[in-house]
Image: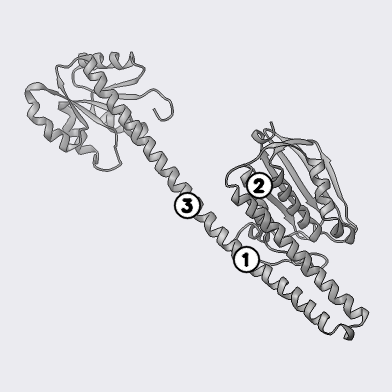
Amino acid sequence: MADQESPRVLVLFDDPAEATRVKNLFQSEGCLVRLESNPAELLSFSQQETPDVLLCSRAFTGEIFSSFDLSGEEFNTPILVFLPWEEREEAARLINGGAADVIYTPYSDQELSARVWNHLGLREALSSLERREAELKRLTSRLQSEKEDREKLLGIMAHDLKNPIIGIVGFLIEITSHFEQYTPKDLLKVLIELRGSAFRVRDLLMNLLDWARAMTRGDQVRLKPINLITIVDQIAGILDFQLNKKHLRIQTQFDVFQIKSDEDILSAAIRNLLSNAIKFTPVGGSIVVTSSSQGKDVRIEVRDTGVGMDSATAAQVLSYSGKKYTYGTDGERGTGLGLKLTRDLVSKLGGTLTIRSEVNKGTSVTITLPQSLTD
């Protein structure tokens, strides 16, 4: 049946010889058969373990029908009633009362076997349909949630891209229109502002491109052997300016060097984590990237000695429902999207992202990838 177990057949007969005949028949066909001669025992047994089919003498139908709500979900086991041929006019009443089928006696073993297995097959088909329906509801709910998250994300990005771009354009118009009025010191202050806005736009665009690339690929993940040292070195090159400005360097402690994953997705996830670590780590602090095996998983951790955050903030940075801007140790304004996007990217690899952080003691973000992606 559903769990690949032997079908459970409950036999409730008033005739011991007939009960033994049925028991022997279905045991020979691989079923688990339980004999009962007292309807009260059925009540107790059914509360502990629901049979897949109940074979019942005509004599016990009154007690069974009155004991269970056969129109609801309390007892949804199909009941096959054994009815003497001369009492066949009772068949319609029994079906209306809750019986799934009526088997006239005398009968052949072949007929009984075929009728019972038909009901067992129908029960399994209905169970399978219910499981599929539950799974469909779960997937529908998840898709709706993802759709809402994407709509929020696009709205946030549109807003966050608009403001710095407008600021950059405004600064440039002002400078070019009144260039002769600016002293070198004033001009440097404006250029520093422009640089900050440009970095913010760059971070937002890279996040947007990472997200768009992942979304347009759907569930497709392109696995290939990749080297973690190469990935981290390439990312360090992209983030070189920010690293040098704070006199930081990225240290690595790899127990696992070569893994099998999607290079674009994993690189984007690690880049977001390192960019965050740089942003919230003060001058001269420490940033360490480690990799290790844990059972059947591979863990990639980015750990810093930055400003950290409390547990409420750590939970909020992974939620699209409440967006809170944060500022780095050099006044860098966070996008509020990096960790959310990283979590979504990692989930496409079948992995998880966890955060451990403490105020003024730093943050550790761990990506855990299943072994199936590293074999």
Mark 3 vs 1, N-terminal side: 3
| Mark 1, residue position | 156
| Rendered image quadrant of residue 125 | top left
The mark found on residue 346 in the picture is 2
Mark 3 vs 2, N-terminal side: 3
Give the CA separation, mark 3 to mark 1.
23 Å
Residue 15 placed where, x, y %? 18, 18
| Mark 3, residue position | 141
Tell which of 352 and 225 is nearer to you: 225
Give the CA separation, mark 3 to mark 2.
20 Å
State whether residue 91 is above or below residue 134: above
Residue 134 placed where, x, y %? 42, 44
Q: Residue at x 68, y 56 (%)?
A: 209
Say few, some or many: other residues with alpha carbon within 10 Å of mark 1 (under 14 / 14 to 19 / 20 or more).
Answer: some
Q: How is the image coloured?
A: one colour
Q: Nearer the viewer, mark 3 or mark 1?
A: 1
Residue 251 placed where, x, y %? 86, 47
Give the CA separation, mark 2 to mark 1.
21 Å
